[in-house]
Image: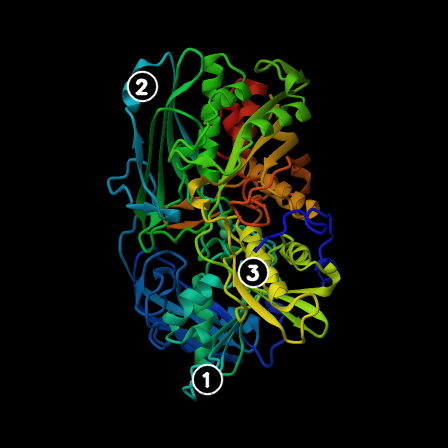
């Protein structure tokens, strides 16, 4: 079989096929799906961080006109297999974190449900909780594995000896805060339980209208939990108003709605999270404390890299970002050590947030690189280039494609890096200006096979898989890929995604959507043509898994890039503004420059937001986040984002899959705060090592 590589649709600038529906406000998002006679849910949540519910007095709530049911742990349907401790709710009186679901009110209107919930009286037996993260916590442990099933610690050579012998060294601590996902659309859910009558394994038991990054993990985790077969669950998620990673796997509100729906068979149960509730039960990026040690010889060649990261984790469910993994592969150094530690606390479980781990760790590593470059008397770009490894230092594998040096050099030209002056040299009135750079990288995260089906029906080609378009442009680019693979006009193709009854696909997460979905579509399309030729009969269909070269595992596979930032910092107020930003990427084949550009500048936008604004304050006395709204938790708005540009170099990486594409969803956020912090140093001579870079930190 030959797979076409460069053909007309791939690489074309095409507008989003879902654009008109979205800009006219007619795209039916999950909460707008038409259902008959819905009941509205409002959750009951724990007011304590640890202990148990002794009594719940629901009489006043039940007596309120319009209330249909009050669900508590005492009357909630039983769950079966604990596929995920986060999802195993209302099965006992135990409380494991503040804000955990302890029940729900179902009513004829959302207002009545909410008011009734406020009438429920709860007595607790409170235990002393611990929600206070410190890197030296006595219960700090080294997990066996970190996210991605990677080893927790690695060691090569003798870092202590190398550091002791080196003329240039750095030893610094960097911290990042808790951050919460705040897509424009919060988590909506409609759950419909179709009744327990009838035992046919094909009888639908539960329908979910959800907002997710793909139904894969919901389909894997929910049926065993609820005691139904996978064939009895259907999930619809045609339109998704953003995610930031929180919709990559199911959270407990979905189980809450499913249990409630089971108590009201046939009646759709609707729940849409409030903005404040987005800070409670749907995960967050955990804070981190990172120590980085570097050593270099007189010429600036790194002799040692040490990266140790410590973060809190929920006692209920361990979640460990792979924070120190970029330090394993990004630069050459014969002596190398990485380690992860977690502190279990009585807090809500964390989850994936855009570039979980790489974002966190690259802030520290790329700031440290800037610091050591200066110590060595080298330009930070040259310092990175002389430490470019010819093969992946972690495993000795060749790079599938890398081109980091090309990005650094090209970016320097485009951004005007030559004009960069010594720290503190350039100012206008109260504003000091500076330039900063940082490398970025994001790995191939592909774990499970993704499938696609190509069908011919009514003179049109249907391309079907469980993918999701969370605002990325998937709907558009999957049609472009299919058009090339089938050699037909793109207007003859209908992309069918956003449903669970389609071939299994990985989620729109880990930056793997385009290359995994694209691969399965290409293979299915080519097999379809091989089987049916150019004039297929009505109903012709082929389903296939994605493929890539057999030896793909012999290559180290990552996207790369460089971030350049210009900032101005006020001597008077300590305010930092990003004035210009450029991201330049080596991300494989770009399928659609319009949607890719949007992904990449979206990543940079989120990176600027994290650099300057975002921080969730967890009040350890109570165990919950106190700045739980947009007044207390600022997300970059239009006025915060300057002229930012994304560029990429021509690349084609067959080892990610036959589209040649690599991941672009996350490489755009990784290291943005480091580039900005490095620019702040260049502007002011002051080194900031703690995100976010708020005015007080600069003035202190
Ligand atoms: Mo994402 S944080 O890769 O779902």
Q: Where does the image place residue 408, in percent across and percent down from the top left?
A: 58, 26
Identify the residue at image location x=30%, y=32%. 155
- Count neighbours of disc 1 (C-alpha within 10 A) and say few if under 14, some if 14 to 19, many if 20 or more: some
Mark 2 vs 1, N-terminal side: 2
Location of residue 136 in the rendering, given as x and y in whole percent from the top left corner: 29, 35
**Residue 162 bears which disc, if any?**
2
Q: Of the residues under marks 1 and 3, which one precedes in the sequence?
A: 1
- Tag 2 secondary structure: helix
Q: Which residue is mark 1?
A: 195
> Residue 68: x percent and y percent?
49, 80
The image quarter in which residue 196 lies: bottom left
In front of the other: 190 or 624? 190
Q: Position of residue 264 (x, y in %)?
A: 47, 81
Q: Secondary structure at mark 3?
A: loop
State the residue in front, 606 or 167: 167
Residue 539 against residue 213 in the figure, above or below: below
Which residue was labeled with disc 3? 467
């Amino acid at each position: 079989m030959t797979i076409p590589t460069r053909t007309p649709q791939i690489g074309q600038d095409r507008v989003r096929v879902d654009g008109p529906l979205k800009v006219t406000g007619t795209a039916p998002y999950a909460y707008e799906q038409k259902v008959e006679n819905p009941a509205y849910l409002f959750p009951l949540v724990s007011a304590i961080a640890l202990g148990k519910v002794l009594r719940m007095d629901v009489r006043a709530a039940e007596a309120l006109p319009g209330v249909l049911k009050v669900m508590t742990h005492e009357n909630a349907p039983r769950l079966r297999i604990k596929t995920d401790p986060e999802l195993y709710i209302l099965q006992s009186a135990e409380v494991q974190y503040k804000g955990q679901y302890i029940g729900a009110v179902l009513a004829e209107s959302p207002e009545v449900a909410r008011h009734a919930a406020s009438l429920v009286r709860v007595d607790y037996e409170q235990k002393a909780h611990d929600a206070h993260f410190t890197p030296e916590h006595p219960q700090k442990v080294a997990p066996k594995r970190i996210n991605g099933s990677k080893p927790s610690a690695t060691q090569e050579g003798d870092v202590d000896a190398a550091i002791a012998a080196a003329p240039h060294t750095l030893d610094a601590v960097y911290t990042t805060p808790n951050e919460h996902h705040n897509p424009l659309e919060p988590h909506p859910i409609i759950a419909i339980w179709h009744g327990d009558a009838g035992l046919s394994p094909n009888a639908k038991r539960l329908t979910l209208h959800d907002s997710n990054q793909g139904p894969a993990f919901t389909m894997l985790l929910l049926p065993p939990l609820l005691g139904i077969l996978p064939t009895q669950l259907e999930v619809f998620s045609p339109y998704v108003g953003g995610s930031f990673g929180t919709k990559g796997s199911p959270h407990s509100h979905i189980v809450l709605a499913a249990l409630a729906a089971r108590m009201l068979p046939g009646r759709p149960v609707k729940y849409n999270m409030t903005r404040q509730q987005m800070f409670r039960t749907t995960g967050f990026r955990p804070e981190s404390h990172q120590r980085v040690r570097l050593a270099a010889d007189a010429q600036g060649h790194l002799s040692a890299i040490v990266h140790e990261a410590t973060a809190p984790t929920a006692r209920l469910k361990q979640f460990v970002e792979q924070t120190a993994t970029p330090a394993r592969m990004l630069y050459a150094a014969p002596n190398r050590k990485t380690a992860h530690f977690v502190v279990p606390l009585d807090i809500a479980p964390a989850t994936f947030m855009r570039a979980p781990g790489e974002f966190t760790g690259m802030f520290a590593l790329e700031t440290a690189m800037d610091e050591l470059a200066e110590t060595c008397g080298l330009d930070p770009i040259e310092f990175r280039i002389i430490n470019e490894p010819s093969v992946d230092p972690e495993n000795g594998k060749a790079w599938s494609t890398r081109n980091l040096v090309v990005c650094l050099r090209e970016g320097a030209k485009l951004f005007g890096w030559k004009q960069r002056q010594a720290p503190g040299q350039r100012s206008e009135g109260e504003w000091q200006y500076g330039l900063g750079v940082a490398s970025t990288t994001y790995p191939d995260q592909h774990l499970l096979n993704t499938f696609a089906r190509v069908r011919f029906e009514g003179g049109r080609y249907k391309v079907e898989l469980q993918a999701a378009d969370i605002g990325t442009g998937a709907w558009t680019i999957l049609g472009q890929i299919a058009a090339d693979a089938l050699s037909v006009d793109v207007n003859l193709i209908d992309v069918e995604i956003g449903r669970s009854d389609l071939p299994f696909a990985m989620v729109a997460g880990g930056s793997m959507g385009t290359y995994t979905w694209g691969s399965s579509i290409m293979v299915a399309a080519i097999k379809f043509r091989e089987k049916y030729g150019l004039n297929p009969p009505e109903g012709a269909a082929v389903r296939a898994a994605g493929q890539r070269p057999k030896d793909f595992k012999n290559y180290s596979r990552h996207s790369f890039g460089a971030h350049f930032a210009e900032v101005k910092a006020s001597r008077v107020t300590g305010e930092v503004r990003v004035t210009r930003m450029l991201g330049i990427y080596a991300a494989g084949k770009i399928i659609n420059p319009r949607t890719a550009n949007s992904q990449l500048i979206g990543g940079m936008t989120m990176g600027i937001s994290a650099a300057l604004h975002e921080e969730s304050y967890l009040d350890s006395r109570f165990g919950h986040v106190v700045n739980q709204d947009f007044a207390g938790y600022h997300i970059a708005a239009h006025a915060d984002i300057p002229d930012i540009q994304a560029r990429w170099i021509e690349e084609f990486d067959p080892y990610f899959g036959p589209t040649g594409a690599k991941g672009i969803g996350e490489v755009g956020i990784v290291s943005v705060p480091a580039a900005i912090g490095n620019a702040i140093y260049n502007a002011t001579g002051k080194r900031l090592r703690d995100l976010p870079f708020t005015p007080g930190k600069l003035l202190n």
